[in-house]
Amino acid sequence: MHDRRTDVKDLTGLYRTYGDDRLPPGQRETSRFPVLSKSGTPSFDRESWRFEVWGAVDDPLTLSWEEFVALPTERQRQDFHCVTGWSKFDCEFTGVPFTALADAAGVTDDAVHVMFHAMDDYTTNLPLEDCLAEGVLFVTEFDGESLPAEHGGPLRVVTPHKYAYKGAKWVSGVEFLTEPERGYWEKRGYSNTANPWAEERYA
């Protein structure tokens, strides 16, 4: 992991691209960080853990934990919006920007969509252009400490411009797609686009 003293990139003003108010409609601000997941917390073994990148890429990747955290990192301050109606402001996340991973794998010109895969078999999808937006981060630390398992540690995705179900906990791989597909909650009636400022909660 790179130097933790690196300046924090403040992305809390990102909402201006999507709406007039920092708190999206229908949300309430909380100082807590509630824990929600589709099932229990999967176990993590640092020695056997691997992160895979495949699909429409020039260089498919299989990374150990040490190799993953050696990728370029950033520390960001951003807001977190859960589809169940709460938002947590000023979260400090440290991790690997999606763009750094995309650059390492060499995304091909025909890639249009991304599927995130997780250790608990969860999946979630986003258009590639949404993944390349500033703030999409593979998080290893929260508030300067290792990301707790209940919040998706050792590695989760955060998507400050989307509801948080678009940010997979316990993420273990990324698949670049040439055609759109839907993930776990998207197949079960949740919005495919998940814009908090348009209240796109359900399909």
Image (cartoon, rainbow, N blue to C red):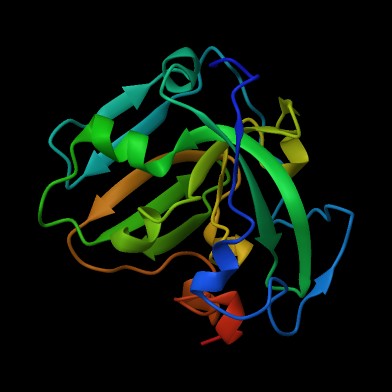
Residue at 17% over, 47% down = 56
For residue 49, above or below residue 16: above
Residue at 10% over, 53% down = 109
Residue at 59% over, 40% down = 170
Q: Report the number of numbered marks.
A: 0
- The image quadrant that residue 199 belongs to is bottom right
Judge whether residue 40 can be spotted in this image: no
Q: Nearer the viewer, residue 187 or 14?
A: 14
Percent position of residue 35, x then y: 80, 53
Judge whether residue 50 can be spotted in this image: yes
Percent position of residue 24, x then y: 68, 77
Residue at 31% over, 48% down = 175
Percent position of residue 62, x then y: 32, 25
Q: Nearer the viewer, residue 151 or 69?
A: 69
- The image quadrant that residue 83 belongs to is bottom right
Q: Nearer the viewer, residue 13 or 45?
A: 13
Percent position of residue 143, x then y: 76, 34
For residue 103, above or below residue 161: above
In this image, 183 relative to 141: left or right?
A: left
Q: Quadrant of the N terminus?
A: top right
In this image, 115 relative to 15: left or right?
A: left
Q: Nearer the viewer, residue 182 or 195?
A: 195
For residue 134, above or below residue 41: below
